[in-house]
Image (spheres, rainbow, N blue to C red):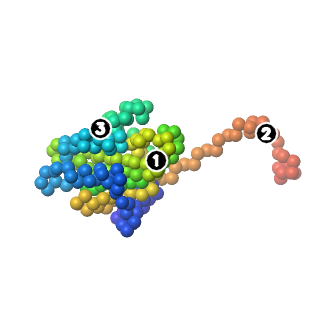
Amino acid sequence: MISRPKGFQLREEEACMPVSGVLGRLLEYWHTLPREAGAAMPRKCVLHPTDLHELLPRISLMKRIDRYDVQVSMIGTSQDALWQAPMAGINAFDLTTPNMRENTARLYEAILDQPSGVQMQETVRRRTGDSAEVESLYLPLADDDGTPTFIIGCSVYLKQPRYGRINDRLMLDHQKVSNLEFLDLGRGKPLVTFEKPAPRPRPEPETRWWDRFMPSRPRPGSDEYLDA
């Protein structure tokens, strides 16, 4: 069964998110890619970046090495200007908080092993520090041997920030997912149980800088003062 923990909430079937706009174009393109007879998904080798020229700045391509090693093997053309370090080859789990590590692994497994598509909405923090709502689509691709290995993703802002770049946060950490829906790509939808992440410890209150100037003796009128 599919659980509804905080961070990975699923919408009811009748309230599913429509795949449209940029994400819809990627889904249509994925369906048109050639594939071997009976294959559930196309191979990555038939993917030609020139076919996605208007989508490239929003595209990420991940490669599963093992369960907790999903490497970013390609990212949008302007990535070098948007990140402090090159993203190619980084493990996607390096961007995942420990309490979301298992859920993220199950998510990638559902995409590749069912296989299925995933459409998500989540809140991200932009480079400026502001929050933004992002919608993403993830679809599976096979390697040259037909093994489900690659995930192609596309992310768009639900509301374009006034001064935002088109892809200043392509790699998402999936900490604040508001909606998640699996897409049937011909093999049904996966049955996934997501764990409820343990609550984070509340941070200790910061010491106020002016406290060092306050008197340490009880104030007049307080119970401690009256008892003294």
Q: Quadrant of the N terminus?
A: bottom left
The mark that comes first in sequence, 3 or 2, is: 3
Location of residue 11 with respect to 153 vertically, above or below: below
Question: Where does label 3 land, which residue?
Answer: 73
Disc on res. 160: 1
Question: Which class describes the residues within 10 Å of circle 2: few (<14), some (14-19), or many (20+)?
Answer: few
The structure residue drawn at horizontal position 34% and vertical position 47%, both measured from the top left corner, is 154
Question: Which class describes the residues within 10 Å of circle 1: few (<14), some (14-19), or many (20+)?
Answer: few
State how far apart marks 3 and 1 are (Cα): 26 Å
Residue 209 shows in the view: yes
State how far apart marks 3 and 2 are (Cα): 57 Å
Question: Which class describes the residues within 10 Å of circle 3: few (<14), some (14-19), or many (20+)?
Answer: some
Q: State which mark lies toward you, 3 or 1.
A: 1
Per the image, label 2 sits on a secondary structure element best described as loop
Q: Position of residue 127 (x, y in %)?
A: 48, 38
Q: Residue furthest left?
A: 37
Task: Check disc 1 and give the amino acid type.
Answer: Gln
Q: Position of residue 125 (x, y in %)?
A: 49, 44
Q: Position of residue 29 (x, y in %)?
A: 25, 50
Disc on res. 214: 2
Per the image, label 3 sits on a secondary structure element best described as strand
